[in-house]
Amino acid sequence: MIWLNPGRRKYLTATVALALGCQPAFSKPTKLPFAASLPAELATAAKSGQPLLVMVSLDGCPFCKSVRENYLGPMRERGEIMVVQVDMHSRRRVVDPRGVSVSHDELIRSWGIKLAPTVLFFGREGREVAERLVGGSIPDFYGAYLDERVQIARLSLAKLP
């Protein structure tokens, strides 16, 4: 076994990952904005003709980190989707689709969500317009499932008056 200093090992790992078309494991963490007012965020998404994606996450969840950094974050940065995040067990306040101020945790429980990550796809007036994407332990197919649901959500929005 060849010993490499940490800086050289990091450089070689990044080079190999990029050559294989992968994102290096030590890439900059991706942050998603926290939901603050779902009616306002839904209105912004509707103006652009897009669904609003809401990622339910859990602090410390490795699957949540993977979904955020490898799928939703890059899609958001490329301007492909509008997405916000809500956290399980968080007391952070958010205005729900009915205009009521609740904690993130209360909102998640009202939606009946028990597993993180879960991605929801909302259209106008806070109606879900595609099947929820629950879990994140299927990395080989996650991107395809996400793309499919985003497309279904967009088609559903196009059909609405």
Image: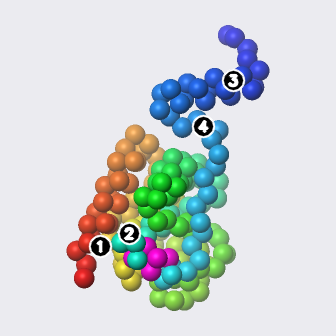
Labels 4 & 2 near each other (Cβ < 8 A): no
Question: Which is nearer the N-term, disc 2 or disc 1?
Answer: 2
Quarter of the C terminus within the rendering: bottom left
| Quarter holding residue 128 | bottom left
Q: Are marks 3 and 1 in contact (CB under 8 Å)?
A: no
**What's the magenta bit mostly, secondary-structure-wise?**
helix
Of tags 2 and 3, the one toward the viewer is 2
Above or below: residue 3 compared with residue 107: above
Residue farthest top in this picture: 1
- The range drawn in magenta is 41-46
The residue beneath circle 2 is: 50
- Residue farthest along the left direction in this orientation: 159
Left or right: 44, with 92 as reference point: left
Magenta segment: does it hold 43?
Answer: yes
Hey, what amino acid is under mark 2? Gln
Instruction: Find the distance from the CA under tag 3 to the CA under tag 4.
Output: 13 Å
The residue at 34%/48% (across/down) is 144
- Judged from the image, the secondary structure of the residue bearing numbered disc 2 is loop
Question: Percent position (x, y) of residue 81?
Answer: 44, 61
Going from the N terminus, do you reach mark 2 or mark 3 first? 3
Task: Decide: is 2 above or below 39.
Answer: above
Residue furthest to the bottom: 99
Q: Amino acid at mark 3?
A: Arg
Position in image of residue 62 (x %, y %): 58, 48
Amino acid carrying label 1: it is Leu
Residue 49 at what x, y percent from top left?
36, 72
Q: Quarter holding the N terminus?
A: top right
Q: Which residue is mark 3?
A: 9
Q: Residue at x 46, y 76 (%)?
A: 44
